[in-house]
Image: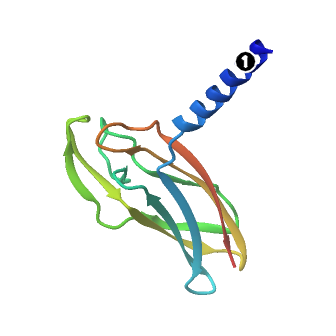
Amino acid sequence: MKKITLALSLVLFTILGAFAQIEKPVTWAYVAKKVSKTEAVLYLKATIDDRWHIYSQNIKDGGPVKTTFTFTPSKDFSLVGKTVEPKAVVKYESTFKMNVSYFEKQVIFQQKVKLNKGTTTIKGKVEFMVCNDKQCLPPEEVEFSIPVK
């Protein structure tokens, strides 16, 4: 009986330890707003926990992983220009030995699209890296699906 109790305790602590290790300091939300019959704007919002930040799309090589949006090609729409972002905080980070641009608390990226069909769903993924003053988490990819009505 003691061996079973010990084994169950070890399994429970291992599972709890694994869950305690997983940090998700960024959550994403998406919405599309039609601006005309043939155009829409996609809003891709990152909400970032306190003391964490994600990086701009405009990071030079040799630094952290920049935020990158990849849209799945479709006959239903075409991208108009590049994904735009608000003005980022620029600061020297000794980890990367360079000035980097990043966002804290929240950021909304925008992508204009030309619609070839009145209603569609735009799919893709965002890759980003999140850091705080003590650590950086490995880059993460999150898939999205945005209905345009």
Image position of 12 with respect to 139: above or below: above
**Residue drawn at (46%, 61%), measured in percent from left and top?**
47
Answer above or below: position of 16 versus 114.
Answer: above
Give how far across and how far down residue 23 sits, in percent. 50, 42
Label 1 element class: helix
When asked about the image quadrant of residue 106, the answer is bottom left
- Which of the image's four quarters has the N terminus? top right
Horizontal arrangement in the rendering, residue 110 relative to residue 13 (left or right)? left
Q: Residue at x 43, y 38 (%)?
A: 137
Most foreground residue, 38 or 26? 26
| Residue 78 horizontal/vertical position (percent) | 59, 67
Q: Residue 122 or 54: which is nearer the viewer?
A: 54
Q: At x 63% / y 26%, what residue is drawn? A: 14
Instruction: Pick out the residue farthest to the top.
Output: 3
**Relative depth, front residue between 46 and 78:** 46
Q: Circle 1 sits on which residue?
A: 7
Can I make out residue 14 in this image?
Answer: yes
- In the displayed structure, would residue 120 be above or below residue 50? below
Q: Is residue 84 visible?
A: no
User: Would you say 39 lies left or right of 51 here?
Assistant: right
Residue type, label 1: Ala
Q: At 38% from the left edge and 61% from the top edge, which residue is drawn?
A: 105
Q: Does residue 141 appear to the left or right of 53 in the view shown? A: right
Where's residue 100, x and y in %? 26, 48
Query: Residue 84: x, y in percent?
Result: 40, 65
| Classed neighbour count for the residue bearing mark 1: other residues with Cα under 10 Å, few (<14), some (14–19), many (≥20) | few
Q: Residue furthest bottom?
A: 36
Quadrant location, the C terminus: bottom right
